[in-house]
Image (cartoon, rainbow, N blue to C red):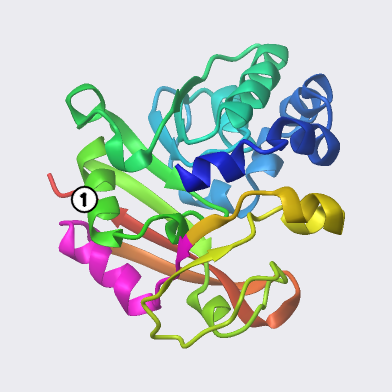
Amino acid sequence: MQNKKAWEFNAYEFWIRESGRPADRARKALEDPIGMLRKYAAYFDAYTGIRVANICGSCGKKAIPLAILGAEVTIFDISEDNKRYALEVAEYANVDIDFQVGDVLEIDLKKYGNCFDVVFMEGGVLHYFHDIDRFMDIMYALLKPSGKMICSDFHPFTKISDLLEFELPSMSYFSKDIFEGEMAHARFYSEEIRKQMPKCSYRKYNMSEILNAIIKSGFMLKKFDEHPAWTNPNVPGEFTAIAVKKE
């Protein structure tokens, strides 16, 4: 799979370089787990005793603080390298996380359906999936009745301008094109290495596509927040949608 190859290209080494050695990362998480969750902490009603599905949870940067705070966390992610780093950090933090490597669209719903109190994603997830309706259907199926989805992602304004400086191509706000682009952290490598890195396959959505997919899947949309871009506080760079599964 194209995106899997991209996310397993030196990913473990990248996390060591950018996030620190697992023992050091664990120490930071233990010192301030709420701080490590950043703005997302405001969207959790509780931590202790809840089951959280962390979608595309990457290296465990949010899953491990959640586990420290008392949540039972399962990461669903495509990268074995991400799993290696996350489990090493979790071991140093003395917490358990479940890490399932595979395509999110192929999650075993017989095993994981109706299991979670919270489905949580952040940091740019939706553009990896070419069928957002199917994606939201799976998010809905993972939750228990009355469960909550916390969906935080890059603002669709990033379709028309490289607001967050990811060096991806701009396009029409209403474009439905699937395109190839560099993975998120490619820009941190030398040009020589960047040329060797596998590309990701992307499909960027506009806001109406995202919100309509949430509603169409059966969710009740409860809250929608826009967040300023870290490169320019005068324009939106991210959003968070809070939706609840009906009882």
Q: Quadrant of residue 22?
A: top right
Q: Residues within 10 Å of mark 1 (few under 14, many from 20)?
A: some
**Residue 100 place in picture, x, y as percent:** 43, 25
Image side of residue 246 versus residue 21, left or right:
left
Q: Is residue 204 magenta?
A: yes
Extent of the magenta region: 202-220
Q: Residue furthest left?
A: 247
Residue 191 in view (yes/no): yes
Q: Which residue is mark 1?
A: 137
Frontmost residue, 96 versus 148? 96
Image side of residue 237 versus residue 25, left or right:
left
Q: Who's the residue at 17% across and 64% down the image?
A: 216
Q: Who's the residue at 70% across and 70% down the image?
A: 167
Q: Callout 1, which amino acid?
A: Asp
Q: Quadrant of residue 116?
A: top left
**Residue 60 place in picture, x, y as percent:** 60, 32
**Residue 139 place in picture, x, y as percent:** 29, 46
